[in-house]
Amino acid sequence: MAVIGKKFGALITKIAGDSLVLYFPQTSNKNDKRVFRNIIECGITMLAAFNFINSKMSEEGLPSVDYRISSDYGRSDIARSHRSNTYDLFGSTMNICAEINRIATPNTMVIGGNLYQIIKSFPSFLP
């Protein structure tokens, strides 16, 4: 999942237990349709990787996995640890992602209201 995220311009900010938090720094320009398209395509690509991931898990004798992807847009505070090169995100956007992720159906992607409003404002997602 981290490899897929990086391919779409995401920074990996946290790996905690079974969670992976990605941050797309290019979203500072709310009018850049390409960046928001990358976010959606990143999630779709992660969902498409489900069978591949589980076949690899099976080859290693491990149980299959289910996952949920949640995305939203908004201001987040970023903290960087002095002891490592990792970042951590804080704020209401992270809280919303955690809440919508918890209630999402396994192997689906959900988006929050702020991201939805931005995406629907674009006449199309064509470049």
Image (cartoon, rainbow, N blue to C red):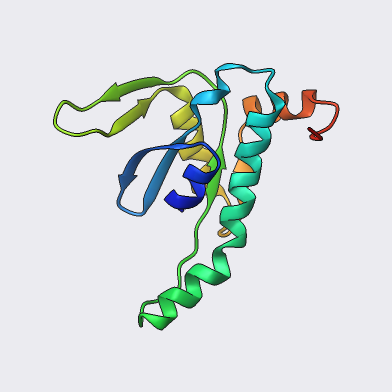
Which residue is drawn at the image coordinates 31% and 30% (left, top)? 87
- Residue 119 lies, with reference to residue 4, above or below; the image says above
Task: Indicate the position of residue 115 as horizontal and vertical percent values.
Answer: 64, 29
- The relative height of residue 116 versus residue 44 in the rendered view (above or below) is above
Quarter of the image holding residue 111? Answer: top right
Q: Percent position (x, y) of residue 16?
A: 30, 46
The image shows residue 93 at horizontal and vertical percentages of 49, 26
Q: Tally the numbered discs.
A: 0
Quarter holding the C terminus is top right
For image coordinates 65% across by 31% down, the residue present is: 36
Residue at the image point whose x is 57% and y is 23% from the top: 27
Where 47 sits versus 87, above or below?
A: below
Tell me where residue 59 appears, x and y as whole percent: 41, 82
Which is more toward the observer, 108 or 51?
A: 51
Point out the residue furthest to the left here.
83
* Quadrant of the image occupied by residue 50: bottom right
- Furthest residue to the right? 123
Q: Along the line of sight, which residue is nearer the eye, 7 or 33?
A: 7
